[in-house]
Image: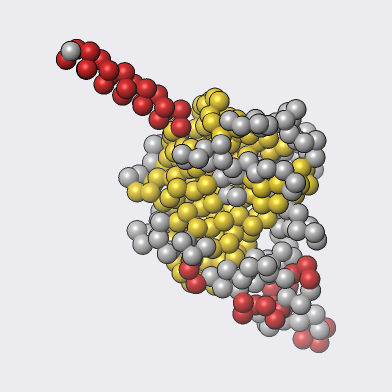
Amino acid sequence: YLKAFLFTIFCSLLIFSCDIMKKLSTVSSPDGNLSVTFSLSDSGNPQYTVHHGEKQIIDTSSLGFEFKNLPPIKNNLQISSVERRSFDETWQPVWGEQKEVRNHYNELLVSLKETDNPQRVIKIRFRVFNDGVGFRYEVPAQKSMADSLSIMNEQTEFALTRDHTSWWIPADYDSYEYNYKETKISEIDASEFASENERVDRQIGNFNAGNTPITMKTEDGLYLSFHEANLTDYPGMTLVVTDDLKLVSELVPWSDGTKARIKPPFSTPWRTIQVGKSASELAESFILQNLNEPNKLEDTSWIEPMKYTGIWWEMHLGKSTWGIEEAA
């Protein structure tokens, strides 16, 4: 009886472990300091967390889509496959601070399929660098998916672990020309800028939101910056701050409220989290360039980097004008 009991316990643990493995996958940076863990909730909702060393820097954050006239892709998903690969190359930019740039990451590609009809398929690709994380959604062409989609919300979350000090500008859909403010994440409030946004295309739908990049410093002195890369044929992403300190994607809408009109197959821009032990490490990061598409020009010999001198920003600061007398 004891042997039968122990065998039953062993089989139960094995089944439990296999079930956990089906719902949990981790990928780490090449140096091992940064890691992303993908999982599914009990309802089949895609989620991820991010650790830097032993400390969690992104708590459990949900992923998904809401569509117009179609069920959302958010719950009732199961993992159909997991693929991994490592990549390491060095490329030469046409211009920039460095002659050569290293593109070195470990990748996790999770394929998900709905357990209920219409059994749509969606993939989430993670790339983990030594200095940050990039991830994106990939939607293949499929019979169970409409030929044309109207995305109403991209439910991408970045769940923060503390009320960090942040540097931000308002989620103005038309302009990035603001001075950055320094506040706690919970204090992001763009209502004081409302009087500047009299044009319809510059109105902010949610005052507790900022344009990316939003940069912050943790109590431990770690610097984080949230942005996007390879923004092609897709709306730009702003980030709304919730009461429980989550940054939630808020895509720039069309006039009718639709966020994106797109046809499968498609990939979203990369959602990026840059991580550094200092602000200078963020400035020295090449994650955004590495996640953008490679240069498609075969001949770049005619490009000659030069310097531009102008008074545009001096005008903003009230130091100069276009006046000829003052310029003289």
| Residue 305 left/right relative to 211 | right
Q: In which quarter of the image is residue 136?
A: top right
Give x and y (percent) for residue 81. 54, 25
- When the figure is inspected, residue 141 is found, relative to residue 64, above or below; the finding is above
- When the figure is inspected, residue 220 is found, relative to residue 86, above or below; the finding is below
**Farthest left residue in view:** 2
Q: Which residue is drawn at 31% across and 24% down?
A: 13
Give x and y (percent) for residue 298. 78, 33
Count of marks placed on residues: 0
Q: Residue at x 76, y 77 (%)?
A: 198
- From the viewer's side, name the closer residue of 101 and 193: 193
User: Image quadrant for the C terminus?
Assistant: bottom right
User: Image quadrant for the N terminus?
Assistant: top left
Give x and y (percent) for residue 301. 77, 39
Please, which colouring scheme is shown? secondary structure
Q: Which residue is drawn at 41% across and 27% down?
A: 19
- When the figure is inspected, residue 39 is found, relative to residue 83, above or below; the finding is below
**Farthest bottom residue in view:** 325
Q: Quadrant of residue 123?
A: top right
Q: Which residue is drawn at 68% across and 38% down?
A: 267
**Residue 169 can be seen in this image:** no
- When the figure is inspected, residue 237 is found, relative to residue 203, above or below; the finding is above
| Residue 225 left/right relative to 301 | left
